[in-house]
Amino acid sequence: MSLSLEPGLRLVAATHNPGKARELAALLEGRFTVVSAAELGLAEPEEPESTFVGNAIVKARAAADASGLIALADDSGLCVAALDGAPGIFSARWAGPSKDFSHAIRSVEARLTDTESDDASAWFVCALAVAWPNGPVVAVEGRIDGSLSFPPRGDRGFGYDPIFVPEGGSLTFGEMDPEAKDAISHRARAFAALKAALF
Ligand code: ITT
């Protein structure tokens, strides 16, 4: 089997996060027919691994094997230097079962205050994995560095976007045009690596 993705293929985007699904669809640029895991009624798998790449592979594998389609999964998160990289792979879990990111953002701010550190540096990581049904899997990672800014600003994007200012910028990801975020984000960088490997 050749490990490449031909234009027009039907792919399943193995995510239940609408913010991510929107950004992945924009990156896929009409190159593929994309159906989401939610549309196919696929179960949301546990994320048992200790790395972004590990969890992206678990999600892609589960969606590909359950659907019979090639699957693209994303595992991502915010890492805060003064919190030793937390919330990291637990970024979604910090929002609790109701996926309340204003709560997760308050937790980040409270924990940062507790450290009494003046280091606001942080980075987003995105691992993307493509799995073939009962076949191989390819995974890549992208990262963007920046710093945290409180109070949160902007209602665009999703998740932790309102508190993240990318390096060299002044707007948060929550304030930026979606196209501007997509030009530099951890997801776009991972996607560029995937393109180089598979397209
Ligand atoms: P799926 O597993 O269904 O894809 P999820 O939201 O549970 O959805 P993750 O476990 O990968 O996915 O969690 C990543 C979390 O990190 C996500 O919920 C966001 O809060 C945060 N995150 C990742 N990328 C982000 C981005 O570009 N902007 C803001 N927050 C982001």
Image (cartoon, rainbow, N blue to C red):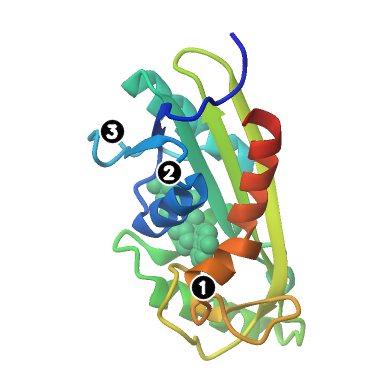
Q: Residue at x 40, y 51 (%)?
A: 21
Decide if residue 83 is in sight here.
Answer: yes
Question: Given this view, does label 3 or label 2 mark the residue nearer the observer?
Answer: 2
Write down the quadrant of residue 82 in the picture: bottom right
Report which residue position mark 1 lands on. Answer: 161
- Viewer-proximal residue among 24 and 149: 24
Q: Secondary structure at mark 3?
A: loop
Percent x, y for residue 111? 59, 78
- Viewer-proximal residue among 110 and 138: 138
Write down the quadrant of residue 92 in the picture: bottom left
Percent x, y for residue 36? 32, 40
Q: CA separation, marks 2 and 1?
A: 25 Å
Q: CA separation, marks 3 and 1?
A: 27 Å
Between discs 3 and 2, the one toward the N terminus: 2
Q: Secondary structure at mark 2?
A: loop
Label 3 CB sits under 8 Å from any ligand 1 atom: no
Residue 3 drawn above or below residue 78:
above
Between discs 2 and 1, the one toward the N terminus: 2
Q: Residue at x 24, y 33 (%)?
A: 40
Dot 1, how many residues are within 10 Å of its Cα: few (below 14), some (14-19), or many (20+)? many
Left or right? Give the position of 173 relative to 51: left
Q: Residue at x 56, y 52 (%)?
A: 76
Residue 57 drawn above or below residue 175:
above
Between discs 3 and 1, the one toward the N terminus: 3
Label 1 CB sits under 8 Å from any ligand 1 atom: yes
Q: Identify which amino acid the numbered label 2 is placed on.
A: Gly
Q: Identify which amino acid the numbered label 3 is placed on.
A: Leu
Q: Residue at x 71, y 74 (%)?
A: 146
Q: Identify which amino acid the numbered label 1 is placed on.
A: Asp
Left or right? Give the position of 196 relative to 5: right
Q: Which mark is residue 42?
A: 3
Report which residue position mark 2 lands on. Answer: 30
